Amino acid sequence: MLDDWLSATLDGGVAGRPASGPLPGGRYRLHGEGILELTPDVAASDARSVVISAGIHGNETAPIELVGELLVALEAGRLVLGAPLLVILGNIPSIRAQTRFVTTNLNRLFRRGLDQKGEEPERARALMHAVDDFFARHRHRPLHLDLHTAIRDSRYPRFAVVPYAEGEAETQPRSAWPDLAAAGMQAVLLQHRHSWTFSHYSRHYHAAEAYTLELGKVRPFGANDLDALDGMRGWLATLAQGVPPASGDVADLRFFQVAFELMRTSDTFRLTFAEDVANFSEFAVGERLAEDETEGPFVVEEAPLSVVFPNAQVELGARAALLVRPCAVPD
Ligand SMILES: O=C(O)CCC(=O)N[C@@H](CCC(=O)O)C(=O)O
Ligand SMILES: [Zn+2]
């Protein structure tokens, strides 16, 4: 069942199959389309409560392939389930269409009280409900890994975005940076304000350790280099088994803090640099990064800024780029 759950979900072929059943070390239960919970018979001593999501953007296929490998290994008993896992396939219609989204960007909708109508808002509500229900029943060292790939090339192809948090949710566990380094991340980007992404949802509302993980560049199914994701594959395997993860060298990570968010507030907004400028490319003081007839130009001031996720084609009112600066390793 698990070994073809992803493809059956995408083909619309899960209806008629049992909604629950055994697997080595535990049981699976389908809570809805693309929402699968795995429960161990006995939680291992290092078990955490883990949400793993992929396909929140439909054309980001490497994470879906990686999660597929994990499920195949669990079904075959090569990995024995030792921790509660909630596995989510995010935006199913957009995965089928191989597009980032169908109507609106799902990864901006994870906010309680969301009252928008439409397919993606409905999906956001279903996923928020699934996460609420899972973390209400499994509270032990909650972790959410929301797996993505980026549109552009990147100076650091694999990097973690840490959602903004305040209060109880702000504390990062001591293992956070060594875990990310061992998972093959090359950089860590600290958000400066609330952003209503899926990983932000788990951190903000559930005080979970949560990351958006960028795992290379957007490519179609079958064209991904999964060998480059060995570290990530290893982390998912240890989490599923509830055993301690490998510990990496924090010196291998570069840390960045978001300084500004460029928003597309009018039709005239444009970025001044080329489409092939990679994520984390740096711009010197005095350089003009964006132009907008209403807002005026955005010019780098005080210290150089690097661009991450630049995209002038986003919806009006949406983020068109993050502008970031290197920072020290946070405590
Ligand atoms: O490459 C891009 O421009 C976008 C890649 C992507 O989907 N990134 C996430 C980051 C979410 C976050 O800020 O935590 C997104 O834009 O939703
Ligand atoms: Zn994405």
Image: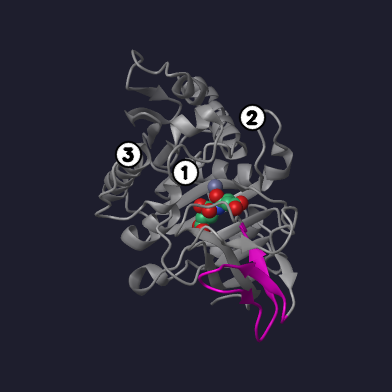
Q: Which residue is mark 3?
A: 118
Task: Point out the stretch of residues depicted in magenta.
Answer: 285-310
Q: In the figure, residue 306 lies in which quadrant?
A: bottom right
In the image, 2: left or right of 329? left
- Ranked by sequence position, the earlier of labels 2 and 3 is 3
Q: CA distance from mark 1 to mark 3?
A: 24 Å
Question: Callout 2: helix, strand or loop?
Answer: loop
Q: Amino acid under label 2? A: Phe
Here the colouring is one colour
Q: CA distance from mark 2 to mark 3?
A: 27 Å
Q: Amino acid under label 3? A: Gly
Q: Which mark is residue 4?
A: none
Residue 39 percent coordinates (x, y): 37, 36
Q: Which mark is residue 221?
A: 2
Q: Which residue is mark 1?
A: 52
Residue 61 percent coordinates (x, y): 60, 36
Residue 66 to residue 45: above or below: above
In the image, 79: left or right of 128? right
Residue 314 to residue 15: above or below: below
Most common secondary structure along the magenta stretch: loop
Q: Quadrant of the N terminus?
A: top left
Q: Nearer the viewer, mark 1 or mark 2?
A: 2
CA neighbours of label 1 inside 10 A, class few (<14), some (14 to 19), many (20+): some
Q: Residue furthest bottom?
A: 302
Q: In the figure, residue 277 lies in which quadrant?
A: bottom right
Q: Amino acid under label 1? A: Ile
Question: Callout 3: helix, strand or loop?
Answer: loop
Depth check: give the residue in front, 71 or 212. 212
Residue 281 percent coordinates (x, y): 73, 65
Residue 84 percent coordinates (x, y): 39, 41
